[in-house]
Structure formats: structure tokens, C-alpha cells
Image (spheres, rainbow, N blue to C red):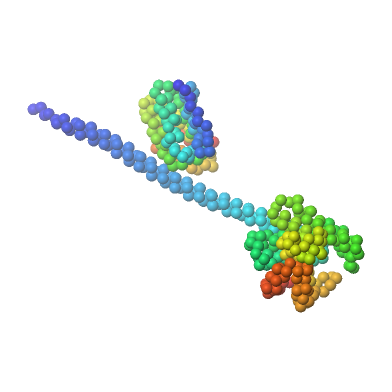
Amino acid sequence: MEVFENKLIAEIEELQEKFTKTTQKLIKDVRRQDKIMIRSDKRQQKEYDELQVKLAEVEALQKEIEDTQKEVVFTMGAIGESRSKETGNHVKRVAEYSKILALHYGLSQKEAEMLKQASPMHDIGKVAIPDAVLNKPARFNEEERKIMDTHARLGYEMLNTSNRPLLKMASTVAYEHHEKWNGKGYPRGLSGEDIHIYGRITALADVFDALGSNRVYKKAWDDDRILKMFKEERGEHFDPNLIDIFFDNLDEFLSVRDSLKDI
Amino acid sequence: MENLTIDETKYTPNIVLDAQKGLIEIKGKSYPENTFEFYKPMIDWVEEYFKGHELPKTIINFEIIYFNSSSSKLFFDFFDLIEEMSNEGKYIEINWIYDKDNDSALEAGEDFKEDFEKLNFVLSEK
């Protein structure tokens, strides 16, 4: 007996075959997708790690550059000071005093920090002053005084050729740290706020430290004498605002002086 | 059949499709903004090429130094097409070229080789 197979079965079988093909392709695709994801995640992680390493390298380099700059600037200041028979700590103290004055005056943290680094270079021009003048154990005559006073302009000229903000700042400091509020300073006889705040600050910091230190040619002044003189020079040698800041925060200056004593 | 060249950009590879030489070459980085759109002209060209324009031997050179995951997906699809052609009896040789320092490129090549075991797939260090 001949059996007639239902035509539907053939159609269903065809469907089944198509369905199997399609599901197989889907399974293959899903597997691939998963593989791609795993690879991609792994790659991203690796790239992230590499990026972190590179970033750390850049940061280390950046710090290296900044540290080098600080060191060079500080060393230049020390060279200037060594020519004028100052001790190493003088430079450090002037730096700290300048920063304190800058912050209380209202300069930004960044600018105050820069001034701390630039102020030690105020005497760099002294490297160009002849030894015979610089090391003279007695008072200068008029001619020698003139030569000595050129150190401010010389320092400015040395540093002003640079385009680095820190050295530009240092050139201003070198140029104007012997100007006086009343216009009787040098080299240009500027007065009041025509003297850059960097110059006014460094002037005060430098004098305060010089008076309180022993030198071959003089003994350190005692504090009473220094403070009296500072009061008298308020609005004369020094910016009255800065003198007020100085007296209002005297303990800060004294604690810097204590922590950076000359040995 | 006309050849097709797509110049390299910051995000996309240089593509050279040369029917006279039987050469398909993809070289560079692959992380296009729209991967499927970018590769469509290439896929179209390859489909057209294998409709009777192909040489007895076709060489495919892949030298991908960096790629995103959608490129990876696209390359799978591309090799699907190549496998289909190969099954139809076309002779195709694939060179996956990688730099010895580029682990990702090597791993990707190994994945493709493993997935398309019937293809003549050669991993070649530069």
C-alpha cells in the first residue's frame, strides 16, 4: 500500500532546516560578539594602564623641569649673595619673608610662590661688580658707590632678556629692590606705587634680614632697633602698607628667622 | 573594473582595491565614526569584483595597527564574505601583517585565523 505523505511535512522540514541554519548563524554571531567584547575590554584596560604610565611620566618630567628651574634660580641668587658676603640662609629668609608679605598684600598663592623664588635673585647684578669695589673693607667713596649701585640695573639687564615669567619677575626685583617709597632710592628714583610691588616687597625683606644679621663690617642690630627704624621708615624707605603688614604679622617673620638661623 | 583607493585619515585606514593586480589592501588605523558606512564602498567593490572580475589568485593584505570593536565586527563579516567566495572555488590568500610589538594586532589575527580555518590565512610579523 502506497503511503501518501502529507505535503505539510516536507514544508515543515524545509522550515526546520532554515531555522537550524538561522539559529546556527545567530549562535556564531553571538559567540563572535562576545569574543569581540572580551578582546575590546582587555585592550581598553591595557590602553588605560599605558595612559596612566605615560601621564605619570609627563608629571614627573614637569616636576623635574620646575625643580630644575627653582634650583637654578636659587643658585643664581646664592651666587649673587656670595659676591656680597652674605650667607646662604640670607637668600632663603628673604625668599620666605617675600612670600609672607606677598600673601598678606593680596597677591595670589601662585604669584606669592613665584616671588619667593624670584626674590633671592635681587643681587645677581653683583656678579658684574669688580672685586676691588665689592670686597672693599672700608666705606665706599663716591665713585665706588656709583659702581656698586649699578648692580641693580646690571641684574635687570641680565635677567630681562629671558621670556620665562619667573626670570622676568626676577629682573623687576633686581631692578627695583633699592628704590624707596619716597623717591630717594636708585637706580631710577621711582616713588610710591611706581615701584613695582615685587620691588617694594623684596626691599623690605632684604633690609629686615640684612639688619638682623652679623656681617664682617657690622654686628646684627637688636630687634628693638630694627623695629624702631622700620616705624620711622614707614612711607619713607618702605611702602606704608607693607610696614603695616609687617608689624601685624611680626610673629610669622620672627619664626621664619628662627627656623633659618645662620650657623 | 575600476579600481578604488581610499586615502588614510586620522581615524581610518588606507584602502587599495586593485582589480588588475587582484589586490585588496587595508593598512592603518580603524576607528571610524560610522564603521559600516565607511567600509560599505569596500564591501560593495569586493562583491562586484568576485562576480567575475577576479583574477585566478587574489591577495588580501591586512595591516591594521589599531581598531575599535565595530571594526573588529566588520572584519568578521568581511571574512565571512571571503569564506563564501573561497567555498565557491575562488583562490584567495590573506596576509595578516602585524608589528611584533603590537600584541592586540597579533591576537586579532589569531582570532580570525581560528574562526576561518578553511581560509588561507597567514600571520606575518613585520
Instruction: Answer with left or right where residue A176 lies relative to residue B95.
Output: right
Instruction: Answer with left or right where residue A231 lies relative to residue B111.
Output: right
Q: Nearer the viewer, residue A217 or A242?
A: A242
The residue located at (69%, 54%) in the rendering is A165
The residue located at (25%, 34%) in the rendering is A17
The quadrant the C terminus of chain A occupies is: bottom right
Q: Nearer the viewer, residue A218 or A111?
A: A111
Give the percent coordinates (x, y) of residue A104: 66, 67
Give the percent coordinates (x, y) of residue A262: 75, 71
The quadrant the N terminus of chain A occupies is: top left
Q: Is residue A209 visible?
A: no
Q: Is residue A176 visible?
A: yes
Instruction: Answer with left or right where residue B48 lies relative to residue B29.
Output: left
Q: Quadrant of residue A234?
A: bottom right
Give the percent coordinates (x, y) of residue B118: 39, 32
Q: Quadrant of residue B92?
A: top left
Q: Quadrant of residue A88?
A: bottom right
The residue located at (35%, 42%) in the rendering is A30
* Rendered position, A180 above or below B80: below
Name, please, the residue furthest toward the bottom.
Answer: A224
Give the percent coordinates (x, y) of residue A192: 75, 63
Q: Nearer the viewer, residue A34 or B3?
A: B3
